Image (tube, helix red, strand yellow):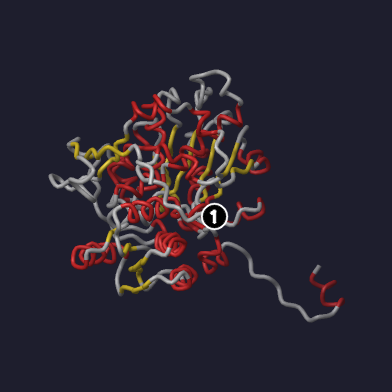
Amino acid sequence: MAKSNFVGYRCSLCNTEYLPGQVTYTCPKDGGNLDVVLDYDAIRLKYQPEDLMNRAEESLWRYLPLLPVPDPGGEGTPIRRAGWTPVYQLERLAQELGLDHLWLKDESRNPTASFKDRASAVVVARAREIAAETIVTASTGNAGAALAGMSAAVGQKAVIFAPKSAPPAKVAQLLVFGAKVILVDGTYDEAFDLTIQAAEEFGWYCRNTGYNPFTAEGKKTAALEIWEWWDVEHHTWHEPGNLLDQHPPLTIFVSVGDGNIISGIHKGFKDLLVLGWIERIPRIIGVQAEGSAAIANAFHAGTEQIIPISANTIADSISVDLPRDGVRAVRAARETGGTYILVSDDEILQAIAALGPQGIFAEPAGATAYAGLVKAIGQGVIDAGDPVLVLNTGSGLKDVRAAMQAVKPAPVIEPTLEALKRLL
């Protein structure tokens, strides 16, 4: 098994550095989330961007030199299909919104139909590296389905704690993939805390988002794909140093719940910046539901103090009382010249309906990013010439009940031509 370029961790709060074997989850001093540190000098000496871009593998594993885990194996299984999701150009919506350029990266094309496959694939690889017998996570559905699916691909045991209110379609995925599923009569945050206690009690390896540092490393692979896509889109590789350096810069809209996706994407671009493979990071804009706005509240208050709220939104995947990666999520927007946008549940449903005619079936959390773009244009945050990429984080099949609220019900007629004519 080839050795990775993983050399340690750095606390995101106090900057204390640790060797790989010294810690597992968070900083012992202050509980801060840990950033994975790579041997950037070794990577820079051994690789150039084209070495990664010319790889044949169409998955997140094409970026293995930039990941802190060895190759997990599993050839020919879903774990080798995580990532490398398509980017679509939305010309008609761009015209409606008055934008010159609008794209959407569709994470619903991942094996279990959500962005969370990226994190779970990398965490499963780490679990195999350290010979963990069982992986456990708390989830409102997507993270659990991703862990269950990626674990099933390589024969890894998985235990999932989910709130009993999780959408049935998501719970069905957990069960079908063969994970041990335990529904909790409580919130996601209560399931999260129970997961940590269970991991300590039974020696399980905990995947929890915003707790296990390897989750952000999986999620950063979306940034690496955006970097590569942008290079191809703008034909910039023939001018070294010009990657992602167009004027104006690319703006990325990301829906935010616990903050781990937006912080992971930020980490990916920061890695590329340290390597000297980009000259600046795209502007990153976080979008939260009004009913789950703890990170946005902190951002707009000019602080990194995340104050818990009582979350209530139709977008269950981003409904979080206490975001576990809030500080890094605030920084992802602040350090890139971005901001946070709040949208209502009604605006989220309108976004689902708007994306559908473009061939995009988004779950509420995925459509939240597009709803944020619409709101940002109205607020003057986005200009017509700004190139924009929206991230759809999950499939609408995850929550059909919400999807049906976004559209008019289909009419019912008698099976006769006369009845059809009357309807038309």
Q: Is residue 241 shown left or right of residue 41? A: right
Q: Is residue 288 shown left or right of residue 250? A: left
Instruction: For mark 1, give the secondary structure.
Output: helix
Q: Is residue 136 shown left or right of residue 366? A: left
Q: Quadrant of residue 157?
A: bottom left
Q: Residue at x 28, y 59 (%)?
A: 206
Q: Position of residue 147 (x, y in %)?
A: 40, 60
| Residue to which mark 1 is pinned | 108
Please state which of residues 283 and 373 is positioned toward the viewer in this rendering: 283
For residue 131, above or below residue 47: below
Q: Residue at x 37, y 59 (%)?
A: 319
Q: Position of residue 59 (x, y in %)?
A: 52, 46
Q: Amino acid at mark 1?
A: Ser
Q: Quadrant of residue 207?
A: bottom left
Q: Is residue 359 shown left or right of residue 205? A: right
Please state which of residues 267 and 100 is positioned toward the viewer in this rendering: 267
Q: Position of residue 189 (x, y in %)?
A: 28, 62
Question: Which corner quadrant holds the C terminus?
Answer: bottom right
Please state which of residues 370 and 399 is positioned toward the viewer in this rendering: 399
Q: Residue furthest top?
A: 239
For residue 183, above or below residue 359: below
Q: Residue furthest left?
A: 29
Q: Position of residue 13 (x, y in %)?
A: 20, 39
For residue 377, above or below residue 354: above
Question: Could you classify mark 1 by the number of other residues whose Cα lies within 10 Å: few (under 14), some (14-19), or many (20 or more)?
Answer: many
Q: Residue at x 57, y 23 (%)?
A: 236
